[in-house]
Image (cartoon, rainbow, N blue to C red):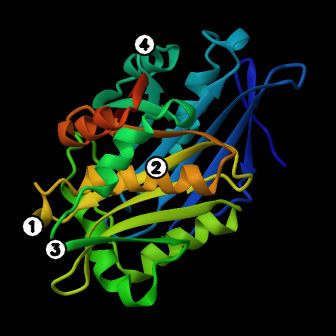
Amino acid sequence: MSHVSRGRARLTPLTDPHAAAGTRRLVWLARDADDNPVGTAFLRLFDRDGQRHLAELTLRVHPAERRAGIGTELLAAAAGAARADGRRTMLADADAGSPGELFLAARDFRQVLRLTHARLVLADADLAALTEVAGRPHPGYRLVEWDGAVPADLAESFAAARRAMDDMPMDDADHGRVVWDVERVRAVAQAVADRGDLLHTVAAIDERDGSVAGFTELVIPGSREGDAQHYGTGVLPRHRGNGLARWMKADQILRVRARHPGLTALVTDTADGNRPMRAVNDALGYVPTHHSRTCQLDL
């Protein structure tokens, strides 16, 4: 394996063994003169229609090695590879106020999205309030749940409901356009299963035609312990204003708490501009933990 010498750091391109459908990842490892690893860069390249112009960067430098040019070298390697692959936009996330946010701002990244991260500790959840919300009648709708891939009879309407997130407020971030169809929703469920985790979905069904009116997804660790991560919640435009998001999420909290007692908490992140979903989370007892920023570099 060849090494690229750049000042005091040597960059080694690596092969990422964890390929995912529709994406590729390029990896660089930075080492110091004594061959100690001091930093990494992961560049995710999207190969699906609507996102072929995008790349996502995750860059880490050991705290003791910062401000020595290593991050700049890793960024240069990743940006060069992204341009060579025809990418026009590179995204990177950083915690608000962190060295990472300052690093990106100093290198022509502009802030395009502000996110609030929140956590619901299940032991502290207000079960009476959640039970009241989950049990509240919603005439014309019923709730269903499933683990893993969507059932065949709901697949088409679920894919359509998944597209309901296309108009979710995302400030100025360029995430491209994700084409949600049955193949893609099944591929996402399979990817979660392949890494040993469990994808749990609660959906609201329109009783007039049996179609999915809204959904909420949660990824539960394979160990069934620790924190579970919300993946997405969406309600089709014509069904909004009926309290479905709050209803579905309250129901899901109660279900997973009962089924997976080893879980500690549920975590989520929401765009600051998405006030309706932040209000839902606040009402259900999610407590903000920190803020992050998505930054964008035009290549």
First in sequence: mark 3 or mark 1? 3
Residues tagged 4 and 1 counted as in contact (Cβ below 8 A): no
Please say if 179 is above or below 252: below
Label 3, secondary structure: give it: loop
| Residue 175, position as x, y percentages in the image | 32, 51
Q: Mark 1 is on which residue type?
A: Arg
Q: Residue at x 34, y 39 (%)?
A: 129
The CA distance from mark 4 to mark 1 is 39 Å
Frontmost of labels 3 and 1 is 3
- Report if residue 176 is visible in the image: no
| Residue 292, position as x, y percentages in the image | 41, 26
First in sequence: mark 2 or mark 4? 4
Residue at the spot of label 2? 253
Q: Which mark is residue 140?
A: 3
Residue at the spot of label 4? 97
Badge 2, how many Cα within 10 Å: few under 14, some, many 20+?
many
Q: Mark 3 is on which residue type?
A: Gly
Q: Residue at x 44, y 55 (%)?
A: 252
Label 2, secondary structure: give it: helix
The CA distance from mark 2 to mark 1 is 25 Å
Frontmost of labels 3 and 4 is 3
- Report if residue 126 is visible in the image: yes
Q: Mark 2 is on which residue type?
A: Ile
Q: How many marks?
A: 4
Looking at this view, name the residue that lies furthest to the right.
Answer: 34
Residue at the spot of label 1? 238
